[in-house]
Image (cartoon, rainbow, N blue to C red):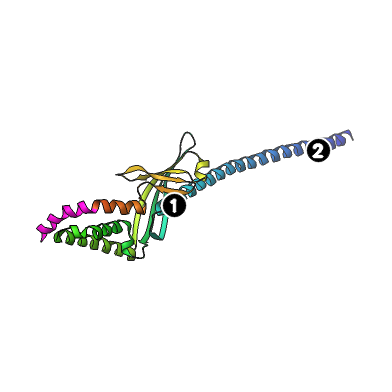
Amino acid sequence: MRNVRFSRDGWKVMLITVTILALILTGMFTLSVRTPAVAKAEVDKTKVEKADIEALVKKAALIFATAVPHDKLLASSATVVEIKITDNNGIEAIVNTERTFVLDYKSAYDEPYLKGKTKWLSENESKLSPAEVNVAKTEIKIHADWVQWEMQVPSTIYAPYKLIASSLEEARNGNFTVYLWTDIDRVKNGTVQNWIPNNIFIPADEEATNKAYETFGEYVKQLTPIYAEAE
């Protein structure tokens, strides 16, 4: 009888021991399962942040590249070539942009530079020699033909830019410094502030018209002897 009771009690002890071991193993398995889940969440967060940054720099690059007065945009795209997080958590990115457009004027003679040239000729024609008048009219006609062509035939321009934001927060607010980033030219080209572009190399219409008006006379003077030799 004692042997029987001992045997039964032994099974009870073994059953308790097995149960405890099962609980320990279950806990260890749960921990082993949960640990990669946390790591996966961190990886996913990194991927989300990278995608977020890529979307921000692409948006800024396209806003900058397509903000050209009198261009009627037909298509545009941007490709992120490189993204770098600087030591102070700033962002540096190189983005290739592509845009297809036609010039958008009611008339070719509305183009600012051409407008300045025609204004100069109308005000100075009586003071010019027949040869100078011929040169001025010919150059204006060449310019007008070119503008008319650009109004009808789509052009595609490829431009790489380097965009810099001082932080992710500034990038989210649309604040970037923009550099033209080619093998030849790597110069500051402008800014994007609160998603509003400012290209320092694109003059206002009035400025372009005035510049053409002020310089066209000297240009005609220099070309006149060249035209004479060609004839």
| Residue 5 in which image quadrant | top right
Q: Front-most of 155 and 79?
A: 155
Residue stretch in magenta: 216-231
Q: Main secondary structure of the magenta part?
A: helix
Q: Mark 2 or mark 1, which is nearer the start of the sequence?
A: 2
Q: Which residue is mark 2?
A: 11
Please give left or right for residue 17 compared with residue 149 in the image: right
**Residue kind at label 2, given as amino acid type:** Trp
The residue shown at (49%, 44%) is 171
Residue in the image at 30% along x and 62% along y: 147
SS at mark 2? Answer: helix
* Residue 21 pos. (x, y %): 73, 37
- The picture places residue 14, in percent across and down from the top left corner, at 78, 36
How many other residues sit within 10 Å of disc 2, few (<14), some (14-19) or many (≥20)? Answer: few
- Comparing labels 1 and 2, the label whose residue is closer to the camera: 1
Is residue 223 a member of the stretch shown in magenta? yes
Count of picture labels: 2
> For the residues marked 1 and 2, what is the alpha-carbon distance in whole angstroms?
77 Å
Image coords of residue 226 (percent x, y): 13, 55
Q: Which mark is residue 63?
A: 1
| Quadrant (top left, top right, bottom left, bottom right) of the N terminus | top right
Task: Give the numbered dot on residue 129.
Answer: none
Nearer to us in this view, 34 or 27: 34
Rendered position, 103 above or below 87: below
In the image, taking residue 80 as reference, residue 226 lies left or right, namely left
